Amino acid sequence: MRRRIGVVGAGWTGAVAGRLLTDAGFAVEVLEKTSVVGGHSRAETMNGVVYEPNGAHIFHTDNEEVNKFVNAHGLTRPYDHKVLTEVYLSPDDDEGHLLSWPPQVEELKELPVWPMVERELASLPAQPTGGNFEDYVVSIMGRTLYDLFIRDYTAKQWGRPAIELSARFAPKRVELRRDGHRGLFRDRWQYCPPNGINEVIESVLSTVAVTLDTEITVDDAHRLGQDYDAVIITASLDDFARCPGELEWRGIEMRSRFEPTDDPGGVLTPAYVTNRPSTRVPYTRTVETKHATGQQIKGTVVSEEMPGAPRRHYPVLTADGANERRNAELAEKIAEHFDIPVYFAGRLATYRYINQDEAIADAMVVAHRVAAELGG
Ligand SMILES: Cc1cc2nc3c(=O)[nH]c(=O)nc-3n(C[C@H](O)[C@H](O)[C@H](O)COP(=O)(O)OP(=O)(O)OC[C@H]3O[C@@H](n4cnc5c(N)ncnc54)[C@H](O)[C@@H]3O)c2cc1C
């Protein structure tokens, strides 16, 4: 008899794990609490315009296996992601300057603050230092650039000063560019699907049994033990264990609005993603997905990303690692409720700040483990 696998969640992780195990001969059912698949990466349309209610999701990877997998499911349209930042050089600076993100030394040389920046850059340590986010960033770009690009952006985004945040995710997020490379990412492959990522995730799930509108929690452990031989959980563990507040999360709210344009190619903001570090505006960035999709349609959707929403978007990786320890404890407690093997994978369940390609790689690892441990 075919071994049965229950997968909780139909985002990238659940979809890919479900697909790989189905292809390997398991009887898989993906259980999703909402009425749609795609998780955080899902795009929607407003008056026909594709936009991203969970924030900009740029697909980029350097992982050949992941690249091959997404190509096979139709994610092939090349895209080179470039971000702008609107910076005010002083409190009485009326006009913001649109600069590249990450900051580019060649562009900075044109600014009146360059002499100060140059002095600071000359006295940086040879290697980044510092256990908290602020110290780390100052050690790679100096105090002036930190104040302009990072300090207020981080405080707005995380609701706490950078000094309280871990430096662990800084290398992935912050850089000072000296080589003129303008794209945000250096990965070999970057794509933007014309109609939103969910089309690709739907293709991944096309041969997998999916049950929508079904929220699974630890209270379902007994039933799951009867229905399946193993379960993969991609949900957030405080939610799954019914202990809201046990883990800290940071959430955003995308305030999205449709705006008419006369020209079918018309856009209203300077870039797909424009960072707004200034405290003069309450949002952290604007997102206008039409820049990337190239959709030809009259009208556009501009989203302002508001921080501080009560949603599980980002794990809060504090310098003391307390939340990660609590997540590991929750995983142990949840597993005790089951008398079948339980696997945890993906961004929410493993409480990691991972991108889509890493979620896919996670799914590949967990599918491989399940197949090895349970047999076909
Ligand atoms: C604001 C933001 C911006 C991002 N930008 C990028 C980017 O530019 N590039 C990039 O590569 N990555 C980006 N990411 C990361 C990307 O969203 C994740 O890596 C990816 O979505 C993780 O997929 P997942 O399946 O692990 O989780 P999710 O996409 O969160 O999917 C989890 C699924 O489980 C379901 N679920 C939850 N609880 C239950 C339950 N109890 N029962 C049943 N179902 C449940 C959810 O409804 C959801 O469908 C961003 C993330 C956020 C939040």
Image: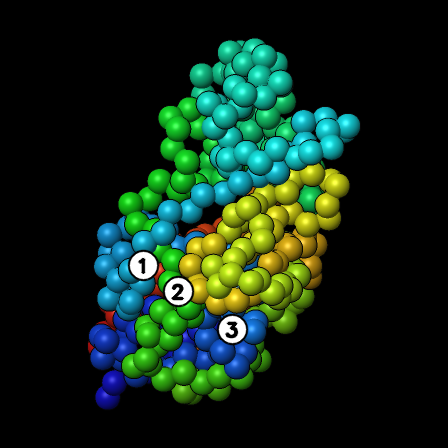
Secondary structure of residue under mark 2: loop
Which numbered disc covers residue 190?
none
Q: Taking 272 as reference, is 255 above or below it?
A: below
Secondary structure of residue under mark 3: loop
Q: Taking 118 as reference, is 75 above or below it?
A: below
Say whether disc 2 or disc 1 marks the residue closer to the N-terminus.
Answer: 1
Mark 1 and mark 2 in contact (Cβ < 8 Å)?
yes
Q: Which residue is mark 3?
A: 48
Q: Taking 273 as reference, is 150 above or below it?
A: above
* Marks 3/1: CA–CA distance: 20 Å
Q: Which one is in front, 251 or 97? A: 97
Which tag is nearer the camera, tag 3 or tag 1? 3
Q: Looking at the picture, which amino acid does disc 1 mark?
A: Arg
Q: Which residue is mark 1?
A: 77
Could you say where residue 147 lies in the image, as x and y percent from the top left? 65, 28
Residue 185 located left or right of residue 349: left
Q: Looking at the picture, which amino acid does disc 2 mark?
A: Pro
Could you say where residue 94 lies in the image, as x and y percent from the top left? 73, 32
Total residue callouts: 3
